[in-house]
Amino acid sequence: AKEYRGSFSYKPGVCVPSLELTRKMVAYDRRSEPRVGERVPYVIIYGTPGVPLIQLVRRPVEVLQDPTLRLNATYYITKQILPPLARIFSLIGIDVFNWYHELPRIQKATSSSRSEPGGRKSTISQYFTTLRCPVCDDLTQHGICNKCRSQPQHVAVILNQEIRELERKQEQLVKICKNCTGCFDRHIPCVSLNCPVLFKLSQVNRELSKAPYLRQLLDQF
Ligand SMILES: [Zn+2]
Ligand SMILES: [Zn+2]
């Protein structure tokens, strides 16, 4: 989060996350301009390589709502965590940047963020594109792989268990949240960025969004 200094106190063309977000928010709702001095929370997400950092600035709530946006771990490690570490470790002659670059890493395909807001994919096709069997996680083109299809009881047990486990987790997190807000209306969601379970809950909700797809697969047995 950074302080917002008012729309007239920035030089034209300057790249400031809080100003960038404010512009977007005001375009959507004029009343949402932060007060001068108010801190505007933001996060940096992954984007196509070469895109200026300022275009990767999002409000935290946007990242919670859009499963295609991922927090830019590389940015946070190299820009936020390593510099202070480097200052400490340089005292004893260790170069942490070098050490970070030598670490082996897994390449994940970066899902490019979609620009059109209305283009939300349906849940079903979203999971078909993963092409993984929800039972054994092997690659397959048919939802449930042929190997698992030959054991329908096993499929039913595993999928039912998975759905139940997710629902149980969700219920527990919602309980924690409600204890804290004191609000017992299911339709008023907690949106506090300081909520200790907000991100866990959003993760579980995201995973639970595949439950209808799993149930649909179950119906075939
Ligand atoms: Zn399988
Ligand atoms: Zn909460």
Image (spheres, rainbow, N blue to C red):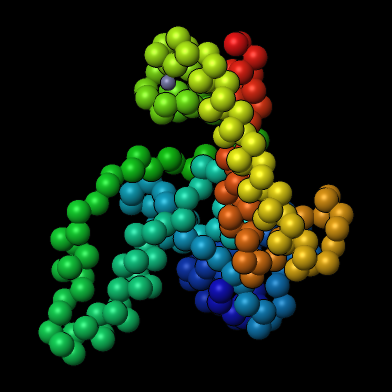
Please say whether residue 117 is visible from this viewpoint: no
Instruction: Decide which of 146, 190 is in the foreground and name it.
Output: 146
Q: Vertical placement of 177 versus 161: above or below? A: below
Relative image position of residue 19 (x, y in whole percent): 58, 69
Rendering quarter of residue 157: top right
Instruction: Decide which of 124, 142 is in the foreground and name it.
Output: 142
Please say whether residue 198 is visible from this viewpoint: yes
Instruction: Decide which of 211, 57 is in the foreground and name it.
Output: 211
Which residue is situated farthest in the left direction here? 93
Q: Vertical placement of 214 versus 164: above or below? A: above
| Picture mark count | 0
Residue beneath the point at 47% across and 50% down = 70
Residue beneath the point at 43% across and 40% down = 111
Residue beneath the point at 87% across and 54% down = 185
Q: Vertical placement of 113 versus 20: above or below? A: above
Relative image position of residue 126 (x, y in whole percent): 54, 28
Quadrant of the drawing holding the N terminus: bottom right
**176 left or right of 125?**
right
Relative image position of residue 79 (x, y in whole percent): 35, 70
**88 left or right of 193?**
left
Quadrant of the drawing holding the C terminus: top right
Rendering quarter of residue 137: top left
Instruction: Decide which of 3, 102 is in the foreground and name it.
Output: 102
Relative image position of residue 166 (x, y in whole percent): 61, 41
